[in-house]
Image (spheres, rainbow, N blue to C red):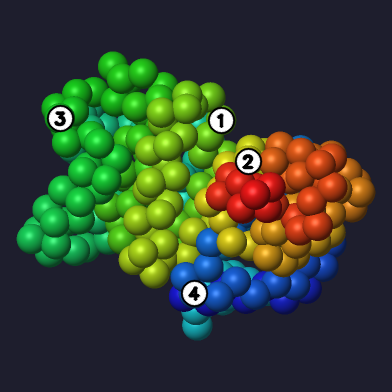
Amino acid sequence: MKIEINNLRFTYPTGLEALKGISLTIDSGEQVAIVGQNGAGKTTLVRHFNGLLKATSGSVSIGDWETTKQSTAKLASRVGYVFQNPDEQLFSRDVLTEVSFGPRNLGYEKSKIDELVKRALSLTELSDKTETNPYDLSPTWRKMVALASIIAMDTPIVIFDEPTTGQDAVNVGRIAHVIAELKKEGKTVITITHDIDFCAENFERVIALSKGQVLLDGAAREVLGQEEILAQTYVDPPQLTRLGKRLGLKETVTRQEEFLKAIQ
């Protein structure tokens, strides 16, 4: 499902203009990472996709729906949003109830709810934790419960807000696996992240924001190789990209397999 953003501006009640005329198109099935320093406008931008924020001017459309004309509840059927802090979205007494809430609230039939919940629990490795209270789990596993609760809604668009923050290497691997599976299913996956190595490994397109405007937008390899421009928003290229440049590699490399091939 396509996302179309046309000259989007947003000003907070304090008078801070957080978005300054952003225009973008995100096609159905794209994997997009949005990067930039704190205050660049990343979260403000994506919160327009599910109606948590409404444009001061300009427009955002999710498919054929303009977001200002739809309720947040209705937009939830098209856009799933995984918050950075899972504690902001978990509220049920056990994992099964938590993961079932979204699809049940969307009015799916019981057979479909059961199927979606089973799939989400399996994908996030939570099948053996269904009776556990989410708050009896570690922060790492609470993150997976939050992911599962959104995956179970089967939305065509899924947004991850800083998915790797506070996660160990094993759980980062689990999250990467979830993203890969969503990609196979044709979902549009968008992440806000400061983890540039995770971004390079898992996303095809990168949008760099700075001071409420688009600084760079393109294929991950192209964007992440522009070290001097990225520096304007205090983003460093991936470690492998920087190492490749120091070694004098002709091509920009962002992933391990690219690096190994280039140095052979």
Q: In this view, does 139 lie above or below 43?
A: above
User: Which residue matches tag 1?
Assistant: 165
Q: In which quarter of the image is residue 99?
A: top left
Callout 4: helix, strand or loop? Answer: loop
Q: Residues within 10 Å of mark 2 (few under 14, many from 20)?
A: some
Of circles 2 and 3, which is in front?
Answer: 2
Residue 128 is tagged as: 3
Q: Is residue 194 above or below residue 105?
A: above
The numbered mark, 4 or 1, whose residue comes first in the sequence reads 4
Cα–Cα gap, marks 2 and 1: 13 Å
Callout 3 touching callout 4 (CB < 8 Å): no
Residue depicted at 36% across the width and 18% down the height:
138
Q: What residue type is labelled 4?
A: Ser
Cα–Cα gap, marks 2 and 3: 31 Å
Cα–Cα gap, marks 4 and 1: 26 Å
Cα–Cα gap, marks 3 and 4: 33 Å
Residue 28 is tagged as: 4
The numbered mark, 2 or 4, whose residue comes first in the sequence reads 4
**29 lies left or right of 242:** left
**254 lies left or right of 246:** left
The numbered mark, 2 or 1, whose residue comes first in the sequence reads 1
Q: How crowded is mark 4: few (under 14 residues within 10 Å), some or many (20 or more)?
A: some
Residue depicted at 29% across the width and 40% down the height:
124
The numbered mark, 3 or 1, whose residue comes first in the sequence reads 3
Callout 2 touching callout 1 (CB < 8 Å): no
Residue placed farthest to the left in the image?
Answer: 111
Residue 197 is tagged as: 2
Residue depicted at 42% across the width and 52% down the height:
179
Callout 4 touching callout 1 (CB < 8 Å): no
Q: Residues within 10 Å of mark 3 (few under 14, many from 20)?
A: few
Q: Which amino acid does label 2 sit on?
A: Asp
Residue 20 point in image, percent of width and height: 84, 62
